[in-house]
Amino acid sequence: MKTADSQGELWEVFIQSKPGQSFKHAGSIHAFDKDNAIENARDIYTRRNEGTGLWVVPSKEIIAVALNESDYFFEPATDKIYRHPTFYNLPEGVTHM
Amino acid sequence: MTTKPEPVQIAQLLAEFEEKINAEIKIEPSDWMPDAYRQHLIRQISQHAHSEVIGMQPEGNWISRAPSLRSKKILLAKIQDEGGHGLYLYSAAETLGVSREQYIEWLHQGKAKYASVFNYPALNWADIGAIGWLVDGAAIVNQVSLQRTSYGPYSRAMVRICKEESFHQRQGYEIMWRMMQGTKDQQMMAQDAIDRWWWPALMMFGPHDSDSPRTSNAMRWKIKRETNDVLREKFINKTVPQAELIGLKIPDPNLKKISDEHYAHGDINWEEFNQVINGNGPCNQERLEHHIRAHREGEWVREAAFHSDLRKQ
């Protein structure tokens, strides 16, 4: 009997390289279940102690902004430069600010 | 993409695509891309992935016969890396809309190629040195350049692979160096290995630019960043001094130094190149049959894994 896709489902791999740091996307792997996925991720992406933490997420569960909609999607932030500290005028000589 | 764009739109999309390429903005899987770009990537990345995986065979042959525990552990780690690199590349190739299963099927049907260098046999331990030093060395020159390829997933796979692969070349060179410090027989073995692997390594860069039909589109769209001949020259200029340093002779009577870091050299036997590419190399049949057999014999493992959820319930 031949399975529908003999290579398993696609999963995304995230690695935390040091304790306290955020997890970063590393790539993807194929696996048939959660245990299989985390072990495959270890074997493929952390053969040289690249991580202190590892996440795997089924690729189909990831929600992404469509690239052709990204301008429109992020538009609300583009004209609000007063959200950055460099926007403000300060008197000469002020320190620790 | 859900709807098929109209011809007018395509011209507009193509202009936007080329604008991105010119601005060094990476193309991502969900971006619009010309079909020729997609097809070129499908062929190139899958060929690259297959090469990593088929490349495990000539070296795997020597795991059980490595001369020390140290060299055995190193060889195992290197071959495991090659397998991993194949998987990075299959992942990148899959983002183009072709399944991994399909890529493997094309390989088994002979529709997809892999680097022809792996159709040469690894006859003795010195060959393991020559493969690491010359074959991985040539691959690294190519892959360093491809880190800047325009397709995002391919570029990211290359960055990861280059980071891991620098030890591969060193382990090969170390084997050659140690043999050159050994007995007369060992020195002859090392020389014999470079005699057999030098030209196949140069062939890895592909045909001359003038005979490479797909080079121009690949360069224009920045899939490739440097041409076959430019990369081959880089490899030669780097490798000749490494050979001389440990007392090995490059098997090319026309090789001569023309400036500080630059060598003139003889031409490849293109007849041999074409023969091996077209399936008539020493190990073509063996390599493919082995892959097909291993894939078939692993069927029950995939089957069991597929039903692993049922087992746990």
Image (tube, coloured by chain):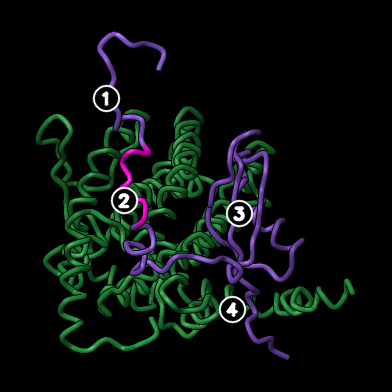
Report whether mark 1 lies on the same chain as mark 4: no
Q: Amino acid at mark 2?
A: Thr
Q: CA distance from mark 3 to mark 1?
A: 51 Å
Report whether mark 2 lies on the same chain as mark 4: no
Instruction: Label 3, secondary structure: give it.
Output: helix
Residue carrying label 1: A89
Query: Nearest the camera: B74 or B44?
Result: B44
Disc 3 and disc 1 in contact, CB within 8 angstroms: no
Report whether mark 2 lies on the same chain as mark 1: yes
Q: Main secondary structure of the magenta part?
A: helix
Q: CA distance from mark 2 to mark 1?
A: 20 Å
Q: Amino acid at mark 3?
A: Ile
Q: Is residue B111 visible?
A: yes
As drawn, the chain in purple is A
Q: CA distance from mark 4 to mark 3?
A: 23 Å
Query: Whole-percent x and y of residue B234?
Result: 23, 44
Report whether mark 4 lies on the same chain as mark 3: no
Instruction: Label 1, secondary structure: give it.
Output: loop
Q: Relative to residue A42, is residue B93 drawn left or right?
A: left
Query: Whole-percent x and y of residue B94?
Result: 47, 72
Q: Amino acid at mark 1?
A: Asn
Q: Colour of chain B?
A: green
- Residue extent of the magenta highlight: A76-83
Query: Nearest the camera: B109 or B160?
Result: B160
